[in-house]
Structure formats: C-alpha cells, structure tokens
Image: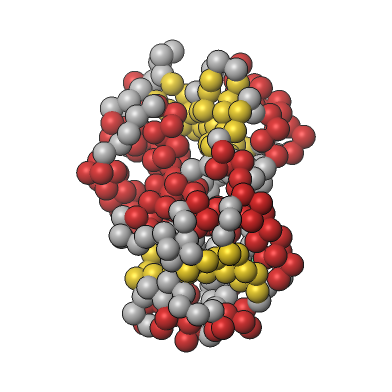
Amino acid sequence: MNCISLIDGKTNVFGIIGNPVEHSFSPVLQNTIACELGHDNIYVPFCVKEKQEIQAAINGAYSLGIMGMNITIPYKKEVMEFLCETDILAEQIGAVNTLKRTDKGYKGYNTDIIGLRKSLEVRNIIVEGKTVIITGAGGAANSAAILAANGKAKKIYIVNRTVDNAAKLAERVSDFYDIEVNAMGYNEIMSITNPDILIQTTSVGMGLTKGKSPVEDTGIFKKIEAVLDIIYTPWETRFLSDAKKAGCTVINGFDMLVYQGIASYEIWNDIVIGKQQTEKIRDILVECYTQGSK
Ligand code: ATR
C-alpha cells in the first residue's frame, strides 16, 4: 500500500511517538491518505520507552526535519512542555495528539476532539442545545467534555465510577466555559432528565471486559437519540448493542480514529480534504481494518 519505492531525500517524514506503538493503526491510516492524495509523505512509528526520553525525542525529531507527529499513550500530556505553542482547544483539554513543525519548534494540537465532532456531524448529530452524558473521566472524557462545552451543549453530565474524578473534570470544564456540568456515579444515571447524546469513553467493553458495559441500566437508552463508544475492538460493544436495541443511532470509535488522523494530516499539510475524498479514505480504512482484524 505504501509508495515505498518512491521514498528519497525529498520525502516528508511524519511519525507517531508512544509506548507501545507496534499495534498502532496510524501508520496504515496516514500512509493510505498520502497514497490516495499522491503526496510524497511517509509516516513511521517511534517507540519512546521512558518518559525521561520525551524531550530528547522531540528535539531529535526536530533536528531530523520531521514535519509532524502524532503523540499517543502515555505521552499526550508530558509532551506539552516541550512545544513552542499549543492550540487553545488542546490547552483546554490538557493533552495534545498532533505536533506540527514551525520555525520555532513544534506546535501542539488535539485532533481527537475534531475526530469526535466529525463522527457526530457526519450523522447530523448536533451538540448545540443538547444534553450530553459522558461516561468516564479520563483523557478521552476530557476531549468529549470540551467538545460538548465548546459545541454549546445545554448541559453536560459526567458519569464515572470514581465520582471525585468526574467532579475534577467538571471543574476543569467550568474553568473555561459557562455551562452547567454535573458529576455523578452510575447509580444516578437514570435521574438525568431528557438526555440526547451519550459518549462512552471508558475502556469497559474491550479486552478483558469484552461483553461488559459500563451502563448497566439500559433504560437510559430509551431516552437518548445517539450514542458513541470510543471503542472499535470489538466493532460493536455490549454498550452499543444495548443502545441499538433501544433504537439509538450508534457510532463506534473507528470514525473518530479516522477523522482525527485526517485532521492531523490536514494540519501538517495545510490542506482541506474534501467530503468525498474523506469518505473514500474512510471506506478504504474500514475495509483494511475489518479485513485485518478477522
Ligand atoms: P483514557 O485516557 O483512555 O480515557 P484513562 O485515563 O485510564 O483512559 O480513563 C479510564 C476511564 O475509564 C476512567 O474514568 C475510569 O474510571 P475511574 O476514574 O473510576 O478509574 C474508567 N474505567 C476504567 N475501568 C472501569 C470499569 N471497570 N468500570 C467503570 N469505569 C472504568
């Protein structure tokens, strides 16, 4: 799939830094976009084993002329102190996943929030004026909460196993936005009146918790228009199948992955990839991923 034979000294190099990175889908994603658009770009994974090595990795990448990078677990926060500038939404989220080369160093962005927004937008799911529930209070919940607040949701409910963590996230959102944000445990979820959208950001439903759902009271789905689960392995979690049975529009996390990658590519290359091309790239990647995971 890669246009490997065409690599030479003029090829623009991009990459992803994290640990682990060997199972990352981003190299396939980014190299597919470059091939589809006929760009002389290549994207490679770089495993940085220790947190103390991050600064050296960023400086080294800059010296080597690397044009842009994705940052993944566990360095999305750590990397921020080594950037020349940070985009306002990334600042509010408190994490970056995209670095763009500038004359002064790398500028940080968070395209997870763009991926999340686009996953909803393409299905005509509008956040503005809606009541949004977020399950979880970790890194992904941060992006979801800032997305909801920035998108002018009416109210936000952060539902988490550890209510203290939900409260901290609610406080963080309130530092930046004048919006009602509530924190609660799962036992209170049915008390939420007129919820519209539920964004599931915990890891429950994948790996060892496959077949489980963080939302045991499925009655909540009867009240909701659309749910998004950031998990895409399995393709349909218990959470999504419960919501589907109740008639909700359901979205898994694969679109978020694709759209965040496209947004990073657009930032790095100063381009806008049109709707038709975006959907073509998405379809190629869905095929590629679902074939690969069979
Ligand atoms: P990420 O950065 O990917 O969002 P994270 O920061 O580890 O991941 O956050 C994981 C979230 O999933 C947390 O909100 C966690 O709840 P706690 O704050 O109570 O730890 C939630 N989570 C993880 N395992 C869970 C489980 N078995 N049941 C309910 N929530 C769970």
Instruction: Tell me what residue is drawn at x 67 percent, y 65 percent.
Output: 166
> In screen coordinates, is 193 left or right of 161?
left
Residue 32, horizontal then vertical, whole percent: 34, 38
Looking at this rendering, what residue extends furthest in the top direction?
9
Which quarter of the image is occupied by the C terminus?
bottom left
> In screen coordinates, is 279 left or right of 187?
left
Q: Nearer the viewer, residue 75 or 292?
A: 75
User: Looking at the picture, does residue 245 appear above or below residue 81?
Assistant: below
Instruction: Tell me what residue is drawn at x 62 percent, y 49 percent.
Output: 176
Residue 264, horizontal then vertical, whole percent: 45, 37
User: Looking at the picture, does residue 217 appear above or below residue 72?
Assistant: below
Looking at this rendering, what residue extends furthest in the right direction?
52
Question: In the rendered image, which quarter is residue 191 located in?
Answer: bottom right
Looking at this rendering, what residue extends furthest in the left direction?
276
Instruction: Tell me what residue is drawn at x 67 percent, y 42 percent.
Output: 77
Task: Give the number of callouts.
Answer: 0
Q: Is residue 217 visible?
A: yes
Residue 174, horizontal then vertical, whole percent: 64, 56
Q: Nearer the viewer, residue 57 or 5?
A: 57
User: Looking at the picture, does residue 55 appear above or below residue 24?
Assistant: above
Residue 38, horizontal then vertical, whole percent: 28, 27
> In screen coordinates, is 24 left or right of 52?
left
In this figure, which colouring scheme has been used for the structure? secondary structure
Instruction: Tell me what residue is drawn at x 31 percent, y 60 percent.
Output: 123
Question: In the rendered image, which quarter is residue 76 located in?
Answer: top right
Looking at this rendering, what residue extends furthest in the front direction?
178
Question: In the rendered image, which quarter is residue 235 located in?
Answer: bottom left
Which quarter of the image is occupied by the N terminus?
top left
> In screen coordinates, is 229 left or right of 106?
left
